[in-house]
Image (cartoon, rainbow, N blue to C red):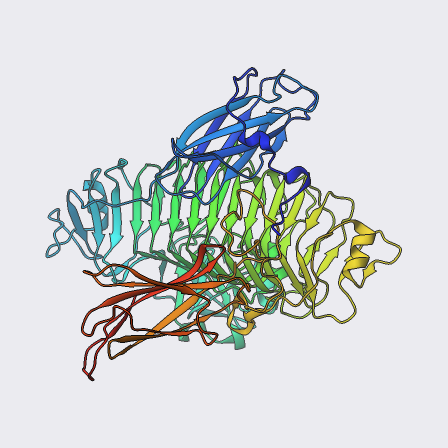
Amino acid sequence: MKKEITGWFVVLALALLPVCPVRAAASLDLYGTFHAMGVIVTLGAADDPDGDATAYVAYRVSGSGAYQPGFPLSRITNTRFVGSLFWLTPGEAYDVRVTFDDPDGGPLDNTTVSATASTRAEIVIAAPNHTYYVSPSGSGTTCASAAPCSLATGLSLAQAGDEVVLLDGVYAQGEMTVPRSGTAGAPIVIRGQPGGTAVLNGGYTGPFTWVAQGGGVYRTAVSAPDPHLVMAGTQRLYPYQSLSDLQGLVWGIPGFYASDTALYVRLAGNVNPGSVAMVVSRYNHAFVVEQNYIYFLDLTFRHYGQGDWAKAIYLNNASDCLVQGCTFAVNDLGIGIKRESHRNLIQDNTFYDTIFDWPWDAVKEGAQLETGGIRLYDPVDGRGTVIRQNVFHDYFDGFGACPESSAAVTNETDVYENLVYRVGDDGMETDGRCSNLRIWRNTFHDVLVGISLAPVYDGPVYAIRNVIYNTGAGSNEYSGFPFKFNSGYDQSGPMFLFHNTADAALPDGNGFALFSPGSWTQLTARNNIWAGTEYALYNANPTQPLDLDYDNLYTTLSGELAWWAGLSDRHLNTLAELRAATGQEMHGLNVAPGFVNVSAGDFTLDKESNLIDAGVIIHGINDDYAGSAPDIGALEFEPALALYAAPGNAAIRLNWEVNVALPTATTWHVEYYTQTAGVYTVTDPLSATRSLILTDHVQNYQWYTVTLHATLAETFWLGDTVRVMPTDRFVYLPLVMRF
């Protein structure tokens, strides 16, 4: 039987009522990204003075078919509802309507606001109007592939619709600008050659003159004052805050101290840095971009770290920019975004540093390297940033998606399908002011914490179908957990955790943990896997509102399941004890998850897993589930059928396999045809051996297309197709083809 979410989650029939005349002053704002859309409702001051109305959203492809319910909107203030639509198609128009329910019959009750808006179309880069070729040693203004100019010249010449191609080599340059903007259909593209090795380098390799200072410390002079990034070989050195700290190696790791143009270095084993390939940053940034429609493609940025707030690319009041296919190799920060910067897309890049193994306290107390690969700086008033399909590794914090403050009503930031690993603190930070932040289908592993929500002002924030494992990693004394909520700051807004898979795996790790201090207006979890090596659920902050249900709680710790502060017996050994003591997880499970291969990082559910079809329907989130109900966890088990065919003499021999236990009422339906013959069908339970020989209407030396469906209640729900050519003799031909 299908299970649907109850209580405030219920998508009432109100969401599907015919459009009613608007009697209130409510207005609707829609903001589309590629696969999502923000829904923001602003009420009039007199619409709902007692603040008890609720809002339900429904949507459809514009002008097409019936409306379907979305996930209900969250009330952020007395006059604002905020929510999101998920899994939309890029470049598609949608009709959206919001229906209100006011239990005391105020002016909002049973009224509807509606609007139409489109999602953002995927970027297609047209052929350039003109190409300017540049090289590290280029000169003149010809800017041709055979006679390249300098990078500065190429940038100065490029107009909207042009591209600047960096030929292979190292560009020891920084603090560059792009003098003009592109347009929507004609961006300015700055790119390397596909498969090339164009490197923008913010550091220099000397020559340096090293003078021994005693105690393993060496001194040299540098050209740019106060460098914050120094490399010894391939390893970044720790930036000590005083010469005495460096002399004593108070953090136990090699490092440096910079005072104006004086640079002091102490390496492991007191090695003379003159015998090591040293790199010292001399540029604060590669590019400051204050224009629109600037695209960076297929470039490498490395060693930008001179002075304060260094970064490779700085998007400041820059909108509709693209950073794609680039590598950011050991910079203070890869990409910084600030002020009125809208709709910037960062995709398919690699960001990395070398500081994963640094002591946690060392970074916290002075390294100023909690930035990671991407950071939205305060203030950021822009909307529509998308961070997708990137890789981040060997940082302290992987990246951050929220500024400390924002004047924007919603940020509409999407973070999805990224890989984050070997991070000494938070894989992703959302700490700050974010509204309509959507985090889905990311993978975090070998991190201390997967995602930090400490705090998220305003909200809502959605974390959906993320995989987080091997938490508690790095050089620290802390246990790991998938989400962090504790902070000493003001209250977080609504947070929704749906279909996440968390497997602590490492020793002393909690599947799900809540620490104090921390406060929030709403924390709701459904259909998650919380697997720990200590507690499946640890709650040291029981005064805050929680709504946990339909999750799977599992731990390898014998005799323990949960720990809950404030109880006479804080150790809850069974799910029944947890339910009785807290009222949480009334439909939850406590079973081994049944993953396919944890050691290989495959958290797909095995076909025998008890979590298949064990979740609850959440409209707008998991409507596309397979089976009789959604699965619990990030990865929906997909029933699959594999059909195999072998040619015979005027015959086709079939056999097939399925990866799921079939309902007893399943029948098999086979249809086959040639390009010139009609369709022939066979329908019955067929053989218990899942095999069949087709002979009717089968002739040699003709291609037959054969389709097999598993049919349940006359509905096709599994299928596969092959092409096969019957024959009466052996030939060296591809007699079977798969689709």
Is 629 above or below relative to 359?
Answer: above
Instruction: Report the front residue among 8 and 451.
Output: 8
Which percent across, then down, holds residue 660? 52, 67
Is 679 above or below relative to 12?
Answer: below
Residue drawn at (14%, 49%) of the image = 143
Count the marks: 0
Residue drawn at (57%, 43%) of the image = 461
* Visible residue check, residue 95: yes
Q: Is residue 702 left or right of residue 642?
A: left
Residue 65, located in which quarter of the rendered image?
top left
Which residue appears farthest toward the bottom when viewing the image?
Answer: 730
Which residue appears farthest toward the right when viewing the image?
Answer: 568
Which percent across, then down, holds residue 234? 42, 69
Instruction: Report the front residue among 489 and 34.
Output: 34
> Which quadrant of the figure contains the C terminus?
bottom left
Which percent across, then down, holds residue 410? 51, 34
Is 677 above or below relative to 497?
Answer: below
Residue drawn at (15%, 53%) of the image = 148
Instruction: Report the front residue among 714 and 707.
Output: 714
* Visible residue check, residue 408: no
Q: Is residue 567 left or right of residue 69?
A: right
Instruction: Report the front residue among 316 and 254.
Output: 316
Which percent across, then down, holds residue 472? 63, 64
Residue drawn at (64%, 52%) of the image = 484
Is 220 above or below relative to 688?
Answer: above
Q: Is residue 362 left or right of residue 340?
A: right
